[in-house]
Amino acid sequence: MSVRAFVPYPDKRLRTPAEPVLAINETVRMIWDDMVETMDAMPGVGLAAPQIGIMMRLAVVDASDKRGQAVRMANPEVLHASVQMRRHEEASPNLPGISAIIERPRAVTVRFLNEAGEIEERDFVALWATSVQHQIDHLNGKVFVDHLSPLRRKMLVAKLGKQRRD
């Protein structure tokens, strides 16, 4: 296992939808292991494969109080989202040093291929739900700033550029 480097925004891979995973094999398991180690090193509560330059529909999420509870998902998709919304400050290691309050459904039901290669449906609530939705966005070629108004997004991206120059 190893900690992987993050793709820097605005790399085109962050804007490209990831490819579906056809089967859970040893390569996928090794990527998941690296993703969990990379997520834990951030520290963060989720990671999608495109964030580290792997264009596969793989994600890991661990919003538990203590680590070691990571859910490994291939091809996750939201089947149902609650009407109740939740606001949370989101960030990304691909856009270091910036964050924004994003509003997303408080709970989601997600279908995905699990570690055993079986289709699983699971309910996620609160921070777990926020993180799962954030990772699915990455798999679809979106980043959290895409949920902001054009002006707010432009301001944050400019701040990121200034930080990189300094």
Image (cartoon, grey):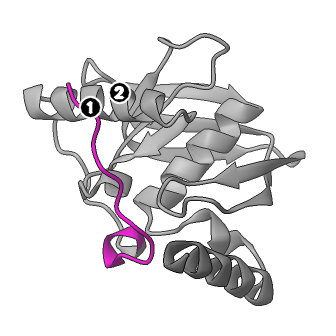
Decide: is 4 above or below 150.
above
Q: Which residue is mark 2?
A: 37
Dot 1 falls on a residue whose secondary structure is: helix
Residue 155: which quarter of the image?
Answer: bottom right
Assign the N terminus to one quadrant of the image. Answer: top left
Residue contact at pointers 2 and 1, CB within 8 angstroms: yes
The amino acid type found where label 2 is placed reads Glu
Q: Which residue is mark 1?
A: 34
Decide: is 121 above or below 92.
above
* Left or right: 59, with 64 as reference point: left
Magenta highlight on residue 29: no
The residue segment tinted magenta is 1-14
Magenta highlight on residue 2: yes
The amino acid type found where label 1 is placed reads Asp
Position of residue 76 measured from the top left corner of the image (x, y, whole percent): 44, 43
* Left or right: 138, with 32 as reference point: right
Q: Residues within 10 Å of mark 1 (few under 14, many from 20)?
A: some
